Amino acid sequence: MEMVDLGKSGIRISRMGIGAWQASSAWGAKDEDVVRAISRAHELGINLVDTAETYGEGHSEGVVGRAIKEIGRDDMVVATKVHGANLRYEELQKACRRSLERLGVKEIDLYQVHWPDPWEQIPLKQTMSALEKLHGQGKIRAIGVSNFAVRDLEEARSCLSKAEIVSNQVRYNVLQRNVQEEVLPYCRKNDIRVLAWSPLAQGALSGKYGVDNRPEGGVRDKNSLFTKPNMKQIEKMLRVLRDIASGRGRTVPQVALNWLVRDELVTPIPGAKDPTQSEENVGAVGWRLTDTEFERIEKAYASISLDYLA
């Protein structure tokens, strides 16, 4: 497994990570299966596991903690996120302590702000000061953010005196690319690694669903990608991904994930409900789309018009 730098932190992470949102009631996965998925991912070279205190109200962190105990702390880069409502100075300190306890570790490798606070209007200066204190105390090794626009990144970075922001976790996949316009160029210029959440668009890029086979219930009920009009548009992309996958002896998800890792700045963090999904995710690295295949995907994307109000 190829390893890359996590910004300027000095931490090395695998080219592909694993997300642990699956370890919550939102996805219906069994805890023991998620533990096995993380362990299998580690066996195959993945060392980055990402979770958050809001996933199952801390449940996911506990499941990740179980996996870390089995694997061994020294072999994993543990990333978690503080809830957007816990960004006041004292609240953030308490939230970090709770996450450390649930994860069963003494130090979090990457501690991220889950999203900028739009409701309480807590000053970023207060949040960054709290994170810098935790960093100085050795409770966290690196500071990251999630869902930050360039304006948020610039403000957050200006509030730090010693530490650096080393990553920005954003939604990014072959269908949803808004971050390409401003966020990616900014992160590239400032050596901020991009962690791609929802790299398979919650399964819209899995090849499992179509106009007449849409998912029912759960998280996907609220995802407008799965309306009939949008699934009809997405089928244009899926036809190309299926053809490339067939020619390469790969799966549709592997082709979609490989499109992301083509950019050296990006580390996808797909979830896995079981070891088989971990194996499939790892199969997305170690090879490269040809220029012709890449151009076919870009042409398909240009033909798609998604309606988020559909």
Image: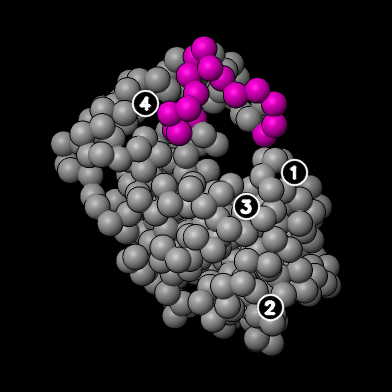
Secondary structure beneath dot 4 equals helix
Q: CA distance from mark 3 to mark 4?
A: 28 Å
Numbered label attached to residue 238: 4
| SS type, badge 3 | helix
Disc 3 to disc 1, C-alpha distance: 13 Å
Name the image quarter holding the N terminus: bottom left
Q: Is residue 302 visible?
A: no
Residue drawn 69% across and 48% down?
30
Based on the picture, tell me whether residue 142 belongs to the magenta stretch. no
Identity of the residue drawn at 63% across and 66% down: 67
Q: Secondary structure at mark 1?
A: loop
Please name the predominant secondary structure of the magenta segment in the image. loop
Position in image of residue 183 (x %, y %): 45, 51
Q: Quadrant of the C terminus?
A: top right
Residue at mark 3: 33
For marks 2 and 4, the one nearer the N-term is: 2
Left or right placement of residue 259 versus residue 73 in this view: left
Q: Nearer the viewer, mark 3 or mark 1?
A: 3
Rendered image quadrant of residue 35: bottom right
Mark 3 or 2: the one toward you? 3
Q: Residues within 10 Å of mark 3 (few under 14, many from 20)?
A: some
> Who's the residue at 67% across and 40% down the image?
27
Is residue 145 or residue 236 the one in the foreground? 236
**In the rendered structure, which disc, 4 or 1, sits on the residue that comes first in sequence?**
1
Mark 2 residue crowding within 10 angstroms, few (<14) / some (14–19) / many (20+): some
Marks 4 and 1, how far apart at CA: 29 Å
Q: Earlier in the sequence, mark 2 or mark 1?
A: 1
Q: Amino acid at mark 3?
A: Asp
Mark 1: amino acid: Ser
Picture coordinates of residue 189, whole percent (x, y): 36, 62
Image position, residue 26 (x, y; %)? 71, 41
